Amino acid sequence: MSVPSVEFLVFAVVGALIFNLFRGLRSRAWVLASLNLAFFCSFLHGWLSAVPYAAFLALGYAGIRILRKQKSAIVFVMLVAAVLYAFFLVKRYSFIPAGMQIAFWYSAIGISYVFFRVMHLLIEVWQDSISEPVGPLSYFNYALNFPALVCGPIQRYEDYREMEEGGRPLALDTRVIGKSIERIVVGFFKVTVVSTFLLTWQKGFINSLSAGDAWSDRVLDLALICGLYPLYLYANFSGYTDFVIGVARLLRLELPENFNDPFSSESFIGFWSRWHMTLSSWLKDYVYTPLLMTLMRRFTAGWAGPYLAVFAYFVTFFLVGAWHGQTTIFLFFGVLQGGGVAVNKLYQVGMTSALGARDYRELCANPTYRACARGLTYTWFAFTLFWFWSDWQQLGRIAAAAGVTAAIAATAFLFAVATALLSLRAWLRAGKAQMSGAWWALAQHRYVRTAMVSALALFTFVVLNVLGGSPPDLVYKNF
Amino acid sequence: MKMHRRDLIILPVVSLLTVIGLWAGAETLSRVIWPEQDEDPCMAFDPVIGYHARPGCTTLTKAAEGPWVEENWTSCGTRAPAVCARRDTHAARVVTMGTSTSWGSLVPLHQTWFMRAASELRSRCGRGFEVQATGGTPDLYESAARLPSILQLRPDAVVMVVTPFDLATRTSDSFSAVLVGNPRAEVPTHQRRREQLRELVTSSRALLIVEHLLYQNADLYVSNYLLGGDRVDYLRQPFSPTWRKRFEFVDAAFGYMADQFQSAGVPFLVILAPHEAQAELAAGASRPPNVDPFALGATLADIAARHHIRFVDATRSYAGVEEPQSTYYRVNGHFNAAGHAILGSVAAEALAAVADSDGKPLCDTEAMTVEE
């Protein structure tokens, strides 16, 4: 069952109806478990194809139970190593020797996201941050939560548990249902219509780029190839996130946000706190902070602090990049992500020391500087994505077709256009904030929003029909 | 903002009105911007030979994705610049038959594949070539029923263009020579109504524009086309039982036609014109496992060889073509002028090598010099 799709939506709505028929929290938890299991089973071909996944989940749960009883560092390290190894094995990482790979076909749907949840539980249980015992039903529902199984978002157990039984279950009234439908339609529209058209255009420019073209055509083609992809990726992934957040809300679950207006970021560090937020915050908590703390304990000189942070940033965001795939191109993508944030941090350290903290703050508040910073952030991210969506062969073909001068000019052109368009967007957003109360109220009126959502639903239906009923694949499903 | 009980009625009504308004607006706008003329007053339907042109008729046709095209039909009901009844003794006459591509549907006459082929053959062979184009029969029974009228045109060679679509039309039973000339069975009313309803939904111009824009992405187009079930199984290996049965039908139908032409001493050439997805796959679009764009051509080549029919698979001409989609009206599915240019070269190459029953090549410059 693909997500988002009409099939999934029907499954989720029927599931939500059954879920809400029950009043008892325990009964609802069992309904959710059945839905999670049914959804997971839709990816299986025979019981054997579920075995590696089930073993991984069982290992995680056994680890939690062991850590609850035994707080030994050695046991913790061994368990983390075992879960990591099991993850690499199930995910079929190429560095696992062929003789050790699992020889039959099995489902590994969303295993990365399940791994993040299981690892989070192990660490938090070991650190005693989760005080109450983790029951098997809660563990199962948390790890295999069907709206968030395929591509996340990565929720924290405490937040999940709060909604499930321990705290206040979320209310579900007509207003909430309306807002959920709105979010589902917007998400479906982004994935089905916006991302499909953007990818179509980007591929069109890739096909039309040729060494025989005029120099100006090559510059334009290359700038568009580079510049359209981040928008496509954003529409594809944030659309999915909107969709599953809307669906989960019908089950009285609130999933965390994954995006916070990422293209308004004025630094690459800032960008990663707005893009795939649940992953970057997971890595900050479990990689960046512990690594920085360890380094600071070892290198105590005061001047070293900022440079240790640069190093920790590099390692963390290298892992963000490298996590996306198992080939050398993704390692390079990781180097570019890690390098981007590390250079950004070094720049901040250097500028603060050169200008002084106050002057640097003033510079950062300068509108022209902010506009250029937004443009540069977008351009850098778009450039790094070459190593995300292509392979070395295709990169070679594109580079050969474009030529060096056209590539430099395309980068400069993209920077200029991104700076101008993102400034215009920022200006419009500021204008929206100042919009007179009556106009704002009208734009937010439920009738107007209903009309807007209906229009988006119609576009989605039409495009979905053209696509033969199956929406385009999610980029992040493969990770 | 507070919800009222009346909103439970008003909100669905707002939603419905929005959908109706937008759809009607988009449909009107797209019909103005992308006009289409698919109803052809020059076409007449005959239950035996299918759609055929009314002799001496002139009409304008247009695919939404293409230009306006004037189609003139001769007194014999063929598409040609020359008079059909009087033969130029110095020129070789080629008659085309088969699908709508055979008579260059939706393309101006001078850009059709047969006019391009004639022009190329004239310059290559140094003799005259004139073409009388018939077609519009995506059904091998109807094509077979037309053979007498085709032979009446006294051709030096006959070229039949087939597409994968033709091979899936009325080919579920066995071919029987006895049934050639029998009227087509009436389509049951409920099936006709269902088809009319389906056409009403799928003939939306707004939908066509969306499809046209989306199908610029070849991978998307091909993967979508491959979802088409039985009709696209000619691309999959091994062939399904249904397609193997269709090939038995084609074998018998080709055999029947070959016998007719051989007794009349007329060389018979069959050209497979690829579907656009097939062309994309041949040109290098990523191929899913077991998908082979050349398998259909190879099978037809074997069948043709058994009946001594000269066969050419135009799919092979698409290998290395950079943008195959630019040679088709993407959604309509017919070849455009660029596609006809490719087909024209293929046909010229094949016709140049065709010899008549006496073994005299059609492209025999020496023979023509003597005649002239």
Image: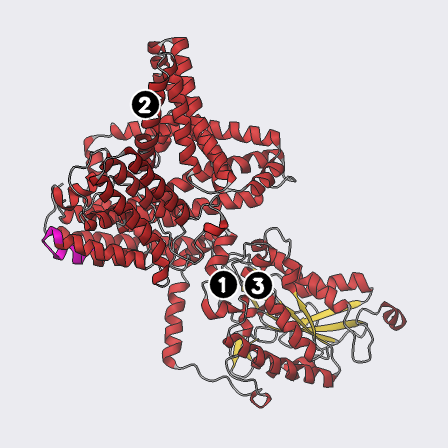
Residue drawn at (41%, 41%), measured in percent from left and top? A233
* Up-down relation of residue B241 to residue B226 (above or below): below
Identify the residue at horizontal 72%, vertical 78% (top origin).
B308
Residue that mark 3 sits on: B292
CA gap, disc 1 and disc 2: 73 Å
Q: Is residue B215 left or right of residue A434?
A: right
Q: In terms of depth relative to the viewer, which is nearer, A106 or B348?
A: A106
Which residue carries the number 2 mark? A293
Measured in 3D between alpha carbons, the distance from the residue under mark 3 to the one under mark 1, in whole angstroms, is 35 Å
Rate crowding at label 1 as few (under 14), some (14 to 19) or many (20 or more) other CA atoms within 10 Å.
Answer: some
In the rendered structure, which disc, 3 or 1, sits on the residue that comes first in sequence? 1
Amino acid beneath label 1: Gln
Q: Which residue is mark 1?
A: B37
Q: Secondary structure at mark 2?
A: helix
- Judge from the rendering whether residue B127 lies leftward or rightward of residue B151; answer left or right: right
* Residue stretch rendered in magenta on the structure: A16-26
Q: Quadrant of residue A374?
A: top left
Which chain does tag 3 point to? B
Subunit ID for the residue under disc 1: B
Quadrant of the snapshot with the N terminus of chain B? top left
In this view of the protein, which residue sits in the foreground, A292 or B108? A292
The location of residue A347, given as percent across then percent down, is: 42, 18
Question: Residue at the spot x=62%, y=68% of the render?
Answer: B297
Extreme residue toward the right, this view: B370
Q: Is residue B64 left or right of residue A19?
A: right
